[in-house]
Image (spheres, rainbow, N blue to C red):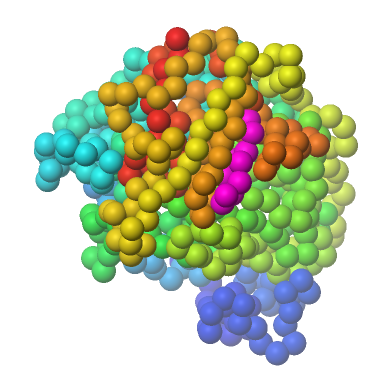
Amino acid sequence: MTSPVLSRRAALALGLAGGVGAMVPGFARGQAVGARVESALRAMAEGQSLDLPSVRSANGKLSVALNVTYGEFLYPLRPDGRPGSRRYVRTWNGKMGGSIWRVRPGDRLEVALTNNLPPNPDPQMPVNVNVPHQFNSTNLHLHGMHVSPAGFSDNVLIEANPGGRIDYAYDIPAAHPPGIRWYHAHKHGATAIQLASGMSGALMVEGDIDQVPEIAAARERIFMCQCVGGNDQGLVEDFPSNAPPDENVVTLNGYLQPILVMRPGEVQRWHFVNALSGRILRLFLEGHSLNLYAIDGLNLPRLETRSGVEITNGGRASMLVRAGAPGLYFLKTDAAPEGSFPARPPAVLAMVLVTSETPVAMGLPQGDLPQSAMLRPITDAEITGRRTLVFSQIVPDASAYLQFRPLIDNRQFDPNRVDQVISVGAVEEWTLTNAAAEPHPFHIHVNPFQVVAVGGQRLATPYWADSVTLPPLTSITIRSRFLRYTGKSVLHCHNLGHEDLGMMQLIEFR
């Protein structure tokens, strides 16, 4: 794919000559860019392959194949066509990331995962499983899906060794909430390195939210926020020197600072998936509000207009964006939250070109949004039990990754020890306390939860999620209905370097 040759003015506007944000005199973001620059930017945007391919269920079923193999590609892609650096990493089907899987409540999703990676250099399981190991064994997790954790459904306790195969089958309940989910590798000891190779993809459960007139009229775009590691040979084989990567550079669907084109007044529907190993994103768009309607694919009661949106590791955000005046605007992520290690600076994720075309009149939803019957607010009277979990860490030497010991309830993960036994049908309130000086993103499989308090202060409007940031030295209070499914699963920190080092608990639904 080739892009048109840029004028110097367009190149400068894009930061291609002197770094992002370099501008010629008289050019300012948020102002009309002029016909020549606008034409060049639009041509470059049309030359991007930014939208990911989709596969959709038919007659109640979607069947897909994941061939796990080494693949070679250039990363990152750039809107001006300049080649990225070579990557030779573990992939699905020889490419970076996966297609968008589109399903509906009541569907059956079948995934044939075949592991064609070479034998593990370390074939024997280590005595301490909470160290990086066996990078060529793998499995699959459907993040945010309310499906069975047993058998060959969303069972992250099984794995496909090199030469092996798992035929997954997920029966999605008819009452499943619609919205954006995602899928990724989840083999303990290799999760971070496989995510740092791009082994993740988007999963969309379609439903009634898609029929809201203002949402149905908006162009939908799904963005996988990723950072693929690589040493000077483009390999991701050493942990942690090149996996997880530093994540100072974040790409959208493989592109570094892609160009998004909108007409004045146009509304687009954006979904962001934070598929990074360890960076919490804090999005804002210059000169615009972000109209959030779902967190982790779970609808808010009404549209919320915000200046910025935080997306924790593993989290998702769905929003409507209405374009303002003609001009070029930066979509950015702010610096990582206080206490994050390593500290990460702000980054430009994309450039939004609002064209000089005639404005269009598109609206935003004004009333209540559709709500899932599964996600009714949990009242005090429903609570059948309470628990407290404490997240902490031992850091003898901050420069020595493998000496770092992240803990839950003062213990590391043990695959032979069940830490939480939960009765199916229970409705519980949990206090998640972070005793550490850095944030820890909490995620639990199978069942979503309602966030009701932060630091002991009740939220005026509780919200549903499946992943939430635990700020340093603070507590989060959540409530959850444990519905329908029995079997073993996990809860963990979704900083995946921490998860691989043992910040995870085994839970059993009985």
Give the residue at x 60% y 17%: 385
Give the residue at x 85% y 57%: 359
Mostly what secondary structure, the magenta segment? strand
The reply to whether the magenta stretch includes residue 472 is yes
For the magenta stretch, what is the residue range? 468-478
**Where is residue 169 shown, x and y percent of the image?**
39, 17
**Where is residue 280 shown, x and y percent of the image?**
54, 53
**Where is residue 490 shown, x and y percent of the image?**
42, 28
Between residue 395 and residue 189, name the one nearer to us: 395
Quadrant of the frame with the C terminus? top left
Give the residue at x 34% y 53%: 404
Between residue 92 and residue 4, name the one nearer to us: 92
Residue 108 in sight here: no
Give the residue at x 68% y 51%: 309
Question: 250 above or below 112?
Answer: below
Q: Residue 190's image quarter?
A: top left
Question: 331 above or below 115?
Answer: below
Quadrant of the frame with the N terminus? bottom left
Between residue 490 and residue 314, name the one nearer to us: 490
The reply to whether the magenta stretch includes residue 174 is no
Tell me if 243 is positioned left or right of 106 in this view: left
Residue 167 in sight here: yes
Q: Residue 271's image quarter?
A: top right
Count up the numbered dots: 0
**Where is residue 413 shown, x and y percent of the image?**
34, 34
Question: 307 above or below 347?
Answer: above
Tell me if 258 is positioned left or right of 154 in this view: right
